[in-house]
Each structure stands twice: as C-alpha cells, then as structure tokens.
Image (cartoon, rainbow, N blue to C red):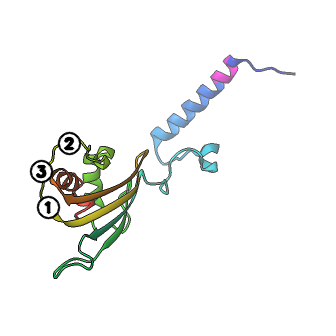
Amino acid sequence: MRTHSLATALVRSGALAAVIATAAACGGTTVTTPEDESGSGGQDSAAAPTTELTIEITYADDPPAEGGTEPKDWTLTCGPAGGDHPDPEAACADLDEAGAEGFEEVPEDQACTYEMGGPEIAEVEGHVGGTDVSTEFNKSGGCEIARYEEMGAVLTP
C-alpha cells in the first residue's frame, strides 16, 4: 500500500499548475475545472451581470399634462451592458461613476433649496455589484434634483 505525503500532493499540484500556465501562455487552449463544469466556479460568456436594475419613470401629473411624457419602464444590466434601457453603455458608464452611493437617500437633516425641477419620479430596484438597491428619485427640492441628475443616463438617456 502506497501512502502520499503532503509534499507529494504539493509537487503534483505544482506540476498541474505549471501545465495549465504553459497551456494558457501558448493560447488556444481552455482548461475547464470540475468547478466550471458544475457551474459553481469560473466565468464564462453567460456569467450573470454585476448590475441588474429595473427602472420605472412616472410623472407627478396623472395623466401627464399637455405635452407630457408617457411612463417608462426599463431594465438595465451592466457587466456586460444590456437590457432594454435606451442607452445601456452610457447608463453603465454613469452608474460606474455614481456607484452604489448614488442610491443613498438624502439625509433628513440636510439643508436643501426649495425648488421644483420637474414632475419625474423614478423607482429603481435591483443590485449594483453586491449592494441591493431600492429607492425613489424625484426632482422636488435642490438636493433631490442633484441626486437625480447625478445618475445621468441611468434616468435620462
């Protein structure tokens, strides 16, 4: 009966790593691990997007005033950019800039100007990276207007 020591296991795993590294350096060869086959590890072209959002934009005037706009409903994915959003590439670029912090609510004790920037109300739900988001954007007050505009093409493609 033959026994294997830790040293033997390390030598064998080191040799396997060298073969994989050599194959990768030569190009054209893809090594699939058992984890890749089970779907629990590795990445492939069908990997889940890093960001998935549903965006619903409505207007305070119901029905919209003369010349108003109909409600909008989009999905946006990033990493890779996609969904039925009108401009997913620009939206993902702006979202990358704003980050998950762009979804934080305006603190209640924040001093803001009293002004109306428009009737738009955007409900956004989903996740940005590992952060779940569920918030409302509107244009009532200076702080809320700034928050809405910070999202750029995510809300105004």
Residue, disc 2: 110
Residue 1 % position (x, y): 87, 22
Q: Residue 138: which quarter of the image?
A: bottom left
Numbered label attached to residue 116: 1
Which amino acid type corresponds to the residue marked 2 in the rendered image? Gln
Q: Is residue 137 above or below residue 19?
A: below
Q: Whole-Å distance between the Cαs marked 3 and 1?
A: 9 Å
Task: Check disc 2 and report its element: helix, strand or loop.
Answer: loop
Closer to us: 12 or 105 = 105
Magenta segment range? 7-11
Q: Is residue 5 above or below residue 32?
A: above
Closer to us: 99 or 124 = 124
Which amino acid type corresponds to the residue marked 3 in the rendered image? Thr
Left or right: where does residue 77 sit relative to residue 90?
Answer: right
Residue, disc 3: 113
Magenta residues, dominant SS class = helix
Q: Is residue 23 magenta?
A: no
